[in-house]
Amino acid sequence: MRVVIIGGSGHVGTYLVPRLVAASHEVVTVSRGRREPYQAHGAWAAVEQHTIDRAATEAAGTFGAQIRELRPDAVVDMICFTLDSARHLVEPLRGTVQHFLHCGTIWVHGPSAVVPTTEGQPRRPFGDYGIQKAAIEAYLMNEARRTRFPATVLHPGHIVGRGWAPLNPAAHFNPAVFTQLAAGAELALPNLGLETVHHVHADDVAQAFECALTHWGAAVGESFHVVSPAAITLRGYAEAVAAWFGQQARLRFLPWPEWRATVAEAEANATWDHIAHSPSCSMAKADRLLEYRPRYSSLQAVYEAVQWLIEDGRVALPER
Ligand SMILES: NC(=O)c1ccc[n+]([C@@H]2O[C@H](COP(=O)([O-])OP(=O)(O)OC[C@H]3O[C@@H](n4cnc5c(N)ncnc54)[C@H](OP(=O)(O)O)[C@@H]3O)[C@@H](O)[C@H]2O)c1
């Protein structure tokens, strides 16, 4: 199958491209050509790479037609963030593709209610990103079910892998938190540390896209969470990370207004965004219909990312 991946050189594409090449697909990537994948792989030699700027070509009204001219059997859209952008692509591809896969986010759910959250629960997104992604999901599901446009939506959790900083136990992205825990230093967490985060390894996200392509009959007209088997609390996460370094976590708990004053504004905003959602999503539907079997638990995925942070000198280990 000829698979066009829009945004194929990022976190997920780094793993998805080698998987699809190994599965004998003809792989075509589209990006602005500004970056390399996070890890080199020989599979890229077999990939047809096109440089197209989505923002510029959407503004010119040509993006969808340019993707159609690449003659895809399937399109994986990694970088769609607005309903207009989704419409711009769907219309030219109507009747020409066997499968259209959109990368969504678990942020289509707002604050968790009954957990683990299933795909069938009502959407209550907040924040522009989640609201737009929920609107795209609703649009694509409607198109699939009413007009037979062959759309599938995959909703990853917090994507983790070698090459970038994972969401940390304080629910922001500053790697210094890992250095603190490795040193046995005290770490303050908001509230009781019982709010949750839900990671997924980038290779497991790639696996889900591959599974959806394989099981397209079950995948079309459906959306799926793509997460690790279980979410973790901030407290449990911090304790596990400290234990990786032979430490017992020294945790202090502060009410949110006090805690937010202990970190930079960008960190406080990231933490708020995550704990206000406190995601804990079910992957049972992807397991059942797509045979999605993640290789990594949340902690295993983060462990790999932290090993990379150490190798890269961004997390320091204490002198022994
Ligand atoms: N990060 C997370 O934790 C997370 C969680 C849930 C869902 N998601 C979803 O994951 C998707 C992003 O996937 P990712 O993290 O694998 O992507 P990513 O690492 O952000 O990579 C983005 C890719 O798109 C290309 N790109 C960026 N802007 C472009 C443009 N204007 N025109 C053409 N290509 C462009 C980039 O290459 P160039 O820079 O060379 O163009 C790169 O290939 C999004 O839909 C997001 O909502 C992410």
Image (tube, rainbow, N blue to C red):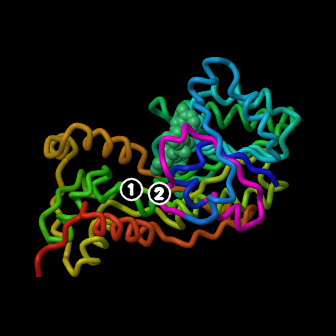
Q: Nearer the viewer, residue 256 or 89?
A: 89
Residue type marked 2 = Tyr
Dot 1 and dot 2 residues touching (CB under 8 Å):
yes
Residue 189 position, x and y percent, is 22, 55
Residue 118 visible in the displayed image: yes
Residue type marked 1 = Trp
| Left or right, residue 270 beside residue 101 | left
Does any atom of ligand 1 lie closer than 8 Å to the CB of label 1?
Answer: yes
- Report the residue at 41% width, 56% height from top: 197
Q: Which residues are magenta?
A: 16-40
Circle 1 sits on which residue? 164
Circle 2 sits on which residue? 38
Mark 1 or 2: in front is 2
Quick one: SS at disc 2?
loop
Q: Nearer the viewer, residue 60 or 214?
A: 60
Screen quadrant of the N terminus: bottom right
Residue 106 visible in the displayed image: no
- Report the residue at 66% width, 64% height from top: 19
